[in-house]
Image: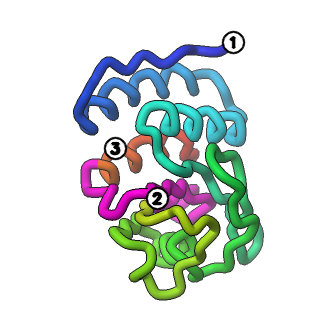
């Protein structure tokens, strides 16, 4: 059954505050991580109009494209490479104000201008990353980081 989102907020923080409980309700009872990643990607794309939203899943020594919303994406990213690989290696959220200034940035789509990547953990190991791109410079900040980390935690299993 589908659940329509109801976001009646204007500020970024208000949108996250409206979205979080709706995502909790949407994911409640669903144990399939891929299905939940797909719905989170869609919800974030719809709510914020991000250029690209999706997950990369750790498989051996690389990140492999998972559920996403947006243009065609890079399929595989090596450990420590690009913004996603860096977030995986450093086990931390990475915010990039201008991807053209990030050493080793992987340009899956030249329209991407800024990016945020949030790692997803299981037993203190990164198992996936949430990658969000904007076609505007300086799009992401600590507000995004704080709430997107909470959203990713909805998927994490101990």
The percent coordinates of residue 100 (x first, y second) are 44, 78
Marks 3 and 1, the one that precedes in the sequence: 1
Q: Is residue 10 magenta?
A: no
Is 102 drawn above or below residue 10 in the view shown? Answer: below
The percent coordinates of residue 90 (x first, y second) are 46, 77
| Residue at x-position 39% and y-position 43% | 150
Q: Which residue is mark 2?
A: 118
Q: Specify start and end residues of the magenta stretch as a single range.
A: 117-143
- Between the residue at mark 3 and the residue at mark 1, the CA separation in whole angstroms equals 26 Å
65 lies left or right of 8: right
Is 146 drawn above or below residue 127 in the view shown? Answer: above
- Between the residue at mark 2 and the residue at mark 1, the CA separation in whole angstroms equals 28 Å
The quadrant where residue 107 appears = bottom right
Q: Which residue is mark 3?
A: 147
> Which secondary structure lies at badge 3?
helix
Q: Nearer the viewer, residue 124 or 6?
A: 6
146 lies left or right of 27: left
> Which secondary structure lies at badge 1?
loop
Which residue is at the far front? 111
Q: Is residue 120 visible?
A: no
| Residue at x-position 32% and y-position 18% | 8
Marks 2 and 1, the one that precedes in the sequence: 1
Which quarter of the rendered picture does the N terminus lie within?
Answer: top right
| Residue at x-position 68% and y-position 73% | 77
Is 63 drawn above or below residue 38 in the view shown? Answer: below
| Residue at x-position 62% and y-position 53% | 55
Q: Which residue is mark 1?
A: 1
- Between the residue at mark 3 and the residue at mark 2, the CA separation in whole angstroms equals 10 Å
> Which secondary structure lies at badge 2?
strand
């Amino acid at each position: 059954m589908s659940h329509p989102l109801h976001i009646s907020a204007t500020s970024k923080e208000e949108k996250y505050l409206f979205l979080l409980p709706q995502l909790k309700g949407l994911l409640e009872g669903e144990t399939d991580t891929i299905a939940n990643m797909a719905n989170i990607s869609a919800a974030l794309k719809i709510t914020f109009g991000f250029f690209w939203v999706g997950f990369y899943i750790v498989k051996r020594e690389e990140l492999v494209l998972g559920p996403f919303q947006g243009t065609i994406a890079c399929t595989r990213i090596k450990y420590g490479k690009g913004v996603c690989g860096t977030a995986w290696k450093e086990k931390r959220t990475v915010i990039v104000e201008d991807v053209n200034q990030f050493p080793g940035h992987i340009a899956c789509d030249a329209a991407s201008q800024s990016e945020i990547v949030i790692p997803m953990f299981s037993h203190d190991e990164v198992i996936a990353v949430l990658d969000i791109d904007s076609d505007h410079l300086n799009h992401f900040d600590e507000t995004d980081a704080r709430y997107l980390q909470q959203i990713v935690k909805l998927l994490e299993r101990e």
